[in-house]
Image: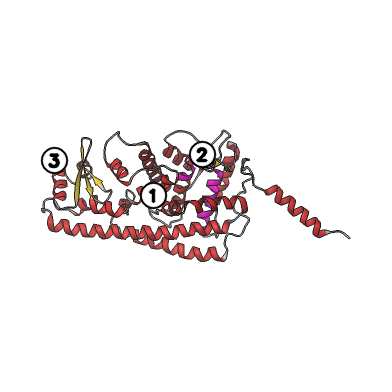
Amino acid sequence: MEDRGGEEKILSNMKMKKMTFDPLKPYNELPLLPPKENIETDAVLRKTVTAGRALAELKGIGETIPDQAMLVNTIVLQEAQSSSEIENIITTTDALFKALTAKTAQIDVATKEVLRYREALSDGFKTLKKRPLLTTNLFIKLYQIIKENQAGIRNTPGTQIKNMTTGEVLYTPPEGERIIREKLKNLEDYIHADDTIDPLIKLAVIHYQFEAIHPFSDGNGRTGRILNILFLVQKDLLDFPVLYLSKYIIENKNDYYILLRDVTKKNAWEPWILFMLEAVKQTATHTRKKIVAIRELLEKTLKVAKERLPSRVYSKELIELLFHQPYIKGQILVHAGIAERQTAAEYLKELEKIGILKSHKMGKENLYLNVKLYGLLSK
């Protein structure tokens, strides 16, 4: 009589051995999408409902801002700062806002990198509005803006993800440009597939797969996090790319990396997807509250300015312009068509007199800080 149970056990062990992940070897066997495992568990579906509700509330509150584009210079810059901080690129909020406004060559390397992240996100958003597709060419474009180079897909061996403290190799991504491009094409197909998977569940899968493919020599994390936001815009879950998603990731950085690796090592999709859904939920709630606070501050500032500014100075357009970014200068008023150069300087001084702005000298330029907006964004 055949020992069928023993035979099945041997075959199972052989299969497990074949599928064992070796962090020291290029993971060219990275499974293609969609995942074979069940990613729509009861826990995931329940969490999807709450995350989706929070995101819908964020989108709804954004529509109450007179000019949603004003959020791009404030919320997006914080996203850029946190996303870069995950990669140990550290700058200050004040340095970022000053660099955004001032004409100066005296900007440190870290601040420049964060500003390029913001530029990449803005460029990706504009590209997506013209052609609503997330493609390998777009990924490369985002990466090139972030890194300020013309490099493309990795085509040399040796890339490894290591523990920064111990030097232990944690993961070796796929190698060979042909293999990487094939996996990116599969990712594109999954992104645009006409299926019934909730977009927020797909978001988690897409983010894992992009990071696992690791198509570039550097900047993969930042490029992948921009892809997250653009995907939500593409799916019409956001009108503007204002979800401050990196806030949750940096606050839970260890869990983020552990759960990413557990998908690779154990096919542990559910904990990873739940983590990303919680990230969407919490950051959508946080961003919505921040937008409400910006809107309320704008309304209060309009009221104070109308009461205290000379009538020749006050205009709704002028006050709204102060909320596009915390620092402002006369040239911005001129460019917006609000005032000529000499008059613009006078307007800013009047705003300083009533405590809305505070002047700062940077090089040869006079910058004016929207004090309360800065305080709100710095929290």
Q: Is residue 274 above or below residue 106?
A: below
Residue 86: in magenta span: no
Q: Position of residue 370 (x, y in %)?
A: 23, 50
Amino acid type, residue under disc 1 in the picture: Glu
Question: Which residue is under mark 1?
Answer: 79
- In the rendered structure, find residue 342 and report the number of the disc placed on it: 3
- In the rendered structure, find residue 216 and report the number of the disc placed on it: 2
Q: Which residue range is magenta in the image?
A: 200-223
Labels 1, 3: front one: 1
N-terminal-most mark, 2 or 3: 2
- Determine the CA span between mark 2 and mark 3: 49 Å
Amino acid type, residue under disc 2 in the picture: Phe
Magenta-drawn stretch, dominant element (helix, strand or loop): helix
Binning the other alpha carbons within 10 Å of mark 1 as few (below 14), some (14 to 19) or many (20 upward) gives many
- The foreground one among 237 and 81 is 81
Amino acid type, residue under disc 3 in the picture: Gln
- Determine the CA span between mark 1 and mark 2: 21 Å
Q: Residue furthest right?
A: 1
- Determine the CA span between mark 1 and mark 3: 35 Å
